[in-house]
Amino acid sequence: MILSMTGFGRAELIDEKRKLIVEMKSVNHRYADITIKMPRRLNRFEAGVRTVLKDYISRGKVDVFITYENLGESEVAVRYNRDIASEYVKYFREMSEEFSLQEELKPTAIGRFPEVFTLEESSEENDDELFACLEKVVREAGEHFVQARAKEGENLKKDLLEKIAEMQKLVDRIEALSPQIIEDYKSRLREKLDEFLQRNDIDEGRIAAEVTIFADKICVDEEMVRLRSHVDGVRGILEEGGAVGRKLDFIVQEMNREANTTLSKAGSLDVTDIGIEMKTLIEKIREQIQNLE
């Protein structure tokens, strides 16, 4: 199975005690970069949630959003944070002394500042039970997430196989042109020698030597063999499935190197045109591969 690095998954759980919603979305990234946003009440479960997510994510920038609501009967209690209030008072008095200000500290004024008073649910909820519910929803969202990535991955696989087939056709075209390029050069060389010597007794051995030197310079047989090998390699990796992005990225770099060498050796305008087509196609393949996990 081939997975795209873009996807979305969602799951929720609602019972008489709680409501949990987990949403996951991802975009391309070289590594696994997971950001989790959740209520403070669930912060202590973050390590456990990350462990669960590893079963569903190996690459990609993934944002995970978790919402939680306690639906059970609970009482809300006011908590007075004495240490925080003491800090406020301390600094207000320092400011009064430093700037010669009249001190007017009232409890109602201090109580308005952040964290002096907080609201907490006085009912206790079993952590093991809560995490079990959270894990269940995370895993369900993860399954939907993987399904979405797999669907997109299959579309990418189909597109890549089509592009690889095009690449093979370009290789075939260059191989078909190679013998004719040598013959054309041989004819041009003969014409030049005829014109220069103005006679018919041209040294065929010299012509053969010149053609051999030229053929060696423009021969792209090795490049075509390697390109065919890379085409087969891409097909094999796509059929094998799994996390294929990095493997394919390496092969595409090698394909681009062979295309560059082919262009540098191009002995005709036709080969140059095909080489440029190759470069354009390889770039399209590379862009698609960046979307694969």
Image: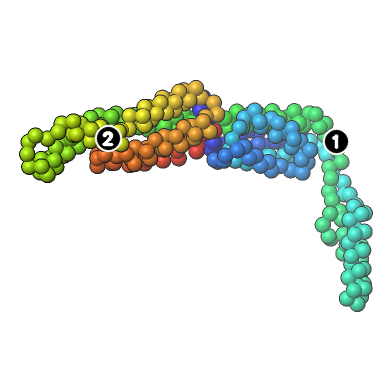
Q: Earlier in the sequence, mark 1 or mark 2?
A: 1
**Residue at the spot x=87%, y=49% of the render?**
78
1 vs 2, front mark: 2
Q: Which mark is residue 124?
A: 1
Expressed as whole percent of the image width and height from the top left, the position of residue 189 reads 17, 39
Expressed as whole percent of the image width and height from the top left, the position of residue 11 reads 63, 33
Residue nearest the observer in this picture, 292 or 237: 237
Q: Which quadrant is the C terminus positioned in?
A: top right
**Residue at the spot x=87%, y=55% of the render?**
116
**Residue at the spot x=49%, y=34% of the render?**
250
Q: How is the image coloured?
A: rainbow
Residue at far bottom of view: 100
Does 76 sit left or right of 21 as displayed? right
Residue nearest the observer in this picture, 1 or 274: 274
Does 45 sit left or right of 186 as displayed? right
Give the class, few, some or many, for how many residues have Cα within 10 Å of label 2's Cα (few <14, many ≥20): few
> Which residue corresponds to mark 2?
213
Q: Which mark is residue 272?
A: none
Residue 111 appears in which quarter of the rendering? bottom right
Asked if residue 181 can be seen in this view, the reply is: no
Expressed as whole percent of the image width and height from the top left, the position of residue 145 reads 58, 32
**Residue at the spot x=92%, y=59% of the render?**
86
How far apart, in angstroms, are the residues tagged by discs 1 and 2? 87 Å
